């Protein structure tokens, strides 16, 4: 295999799988992406996503320069800040990046999942097959991987990459003991259209970046704006094709807490929007009137209950012609906002290892092993960090330690404000 042409089958056309595909195309490595969706626009792609510096680096590595420029131009109007406040909208700490020191490439960004998927599909459409639901795989006598799909078709590759998300069918066959587990925490909420009423209720800090509200009760509230750049659609038109639109501004509004704290018995319950809204109102009793009023602004069609799942550390497995990336192997809670970025990092790392196979520097199995050994270290550390953040945000607040922590944040915030003022 070393120094010879080989073929990669990627199961899943999400962000990680498509980022890997773009990188492989750059390196001249043959690949096919098999995606279960019927078409690029057949399923909603969720809300805006936060791309951090490591995610930005991975995308810059993967995308040809013209596509990178479109990605940059179609992002949201993202301020480089993050704020933590109380349920009374009293600021605890606000961190803002120094705009003079922001790297041109490795920086924080906001992007619509719809826009990003559109960019990632550009130029590789010939190698993406839709309406392909993975069924199983098996190793052939020739040492290749045969992949079988629900429609009766099959394909053969030298390497199979599972990029099919938290419910990965590939993982269930390859690593059956690595399924994610329920954390007991759920999020309820959705998006709020930024009409006149909502704009009047928003905390001013949300225009500087996302906000985490930490009340004294065992809940947490996350808010973040999606405001597309005015010229985004003009740049996306350069890519052609039929895609869904995501050009209306909105606020993500999600209240997290333990399932039983909301009064629910199961995270799989199909609950009407009004039941969810009432549970949110009860959990936010005594909060600032503006936050309570925002809860009433969540679009009824968007209101949902989202169980939070996470992977668990698992023993190292023997590397083979099957490997995994992103949520397929290390799904994590949303409380650090890094799950998608770690998937992009996986794609960049795996593609760089496979490029060494293409150039004759490594064997395929050595490249897979190098990728997996590194990935397990940083990815499962991120999983643990994310779960810890979730537990701290939604656990019972200590009557002494929590007030002390708030005081510490306010003190640090005062210092940060003084430094920002001194730098002007």
Image: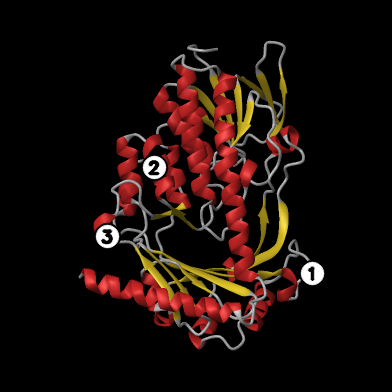
Give the label, 2 or 1, closer to the camera.
2
Is residue 126 visible in this depiction of the protein? no
The residue that label 2 is drawn on is 57
Q: CA distance from mark 2 to mark 1?
A: 42 Å
In the rendered image, which residue does mark 3 sit on?
A: 99
Please give the residue where the numbered disc 1 appears in the rendered image. 265
Mark closer to the observer (1, 3): 3
Q: Residue at x 29, y 61 (%)?
A: 98
For disc 3, the neighbor class at 10 Å (few under 14, some 14 to 19, many from 20) is few
**Considering depth in this image, is 291 or 191 the residue closer to the camera?**
291
Q: Residue at x 27, y 55 (%)?
A: 101
Is 34 positioned to the left or the right of 420 in the image? Answer: right
**Residue at the location (75% across, 61% down)?**
268
As measured in the structure, the alpha-carbon distance from the residue carrying label 1 to the one carrying label 3 is 47 Å
In this rendering, would 292 be left or right of 398?
Answer: left
Name the one closer to the observer, 120 or 330.
330
| Mark nearer the N terminus (1 vs 3) | 3
Q: CA distance from mark 2 to mark 3?
A: 18 Å
Residue situated in front as seen by the camera: 177 or 206: 177
**In the structure shown, which secondary structural element does the residue marked by tag 1 occupy?**
loop
Q: Are marks 2 and 3 in contact (CB under 8 Å)?
A: no
Residue 422 percent location from the top left of the image: 23, 72
Question: Viewed as shown, does residue 303 lie left or right of 127?
Answer: right
Which quadrant of the structure image shows residue 320?
Answer: top right
Name above or below for residue 288 compared with residue 378: below
Query: What colour scheme was applied to this rendering of the protein?
Result: secondary structure
- Classify mark 2: helix, strand or loop: helix
If you read the primary sequence from the N terminus, does the residue marked by circle 2 or circle 1 appear first? 2
Q: In the rendered view, would you say 46 is above or below 63?
A: below
**Quadrant of image for the N terminus:** top right
Q: For residue 66, which quarter of the picture? A: top left
Quarter of the image that includes the C terminus? bottom left
């Amino acid at each position: 295999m070393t120094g010879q042409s080989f073929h990669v089958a990627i199961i899943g056309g999400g962000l990680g799988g498509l980022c890997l595909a773009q990188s492989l195309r750059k390196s001249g490595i043959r690949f096919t992406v098999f995606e279960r969706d019927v078409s690029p626009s057949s399923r909603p792609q969720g809300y805006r996503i936060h791309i951090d510096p490591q995610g930005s680096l991975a995308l810059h590595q993967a995308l040809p320069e013209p596509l990178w420029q479109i990605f940059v131009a179609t992002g949201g109007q993202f301020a480089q800040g993050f704020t933590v406040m109380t349920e009374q909208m009293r600021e605890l700490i606000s961190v803002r990046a120094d705009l003079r020191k922001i790297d041109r490439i490795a920086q924080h960004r906001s992007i619509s999942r719809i826009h990003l998927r559109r960019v990632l599909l550009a130029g590789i459409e010939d190698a993406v097959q839709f309406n392909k639901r993975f069924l199983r795989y098996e190793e052939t006598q020739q040492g290749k991987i045969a992949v079988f799909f629900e429609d009766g078709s099959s394909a053969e590759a030298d390497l199979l990459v599972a990029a099919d998300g938290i419910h990965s069918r590939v993982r269930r066959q390859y690593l059956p003991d690595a399924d994610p587990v329920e954390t007991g925490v759920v999020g309820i909420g959705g998006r709020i259209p930024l009409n006149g009423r909502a704009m009047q209720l928003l905390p001013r800090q949300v225009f500087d970046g996302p906000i985490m509200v930490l009340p004294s009760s065992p809940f947490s509230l996350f808010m973040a704006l999606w405001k597309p750049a005015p010229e985004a659609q003009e740049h996306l038109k350069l890519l052609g094709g039929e895609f869904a639109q995501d050009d209306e501004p909105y606020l993500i509004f999600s209240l997290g807490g333990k399932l039983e704290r909301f009064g629910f018995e199961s995270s799989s319950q199909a609950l009407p929007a009004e039941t969810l809204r009432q549970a949110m109102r009860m959990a936010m009793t005594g909060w600032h009137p503006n936050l309570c009023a925002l809860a009433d602004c969540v679009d009824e069609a968007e209101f949902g209950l989202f169980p939070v799942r996470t992977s668990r550390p698992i023993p190292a497995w023997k590397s083979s012609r099957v490997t995994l990336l992103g949520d397929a192997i290390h799904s994590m809670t949303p409380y650090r906002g890094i799950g998608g970025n770690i998937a992009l990092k996986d794609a960049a790392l795996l593609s760089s290892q496979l490029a060494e196979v293409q150039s004759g520097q490594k064997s395929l199995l050595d490249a897979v092993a190098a990728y997996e050994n590194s990935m397990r270290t940083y990815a499962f550390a991120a999983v643990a960090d994310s779960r810890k953040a979730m537990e701290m945000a939604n656990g019972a607040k200590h009557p002494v330690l929590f007030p002390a922590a708030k005081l510490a944040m306010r003190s640090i915030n005062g210092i940060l404000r003084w430094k920002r003022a001194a730098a002007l």
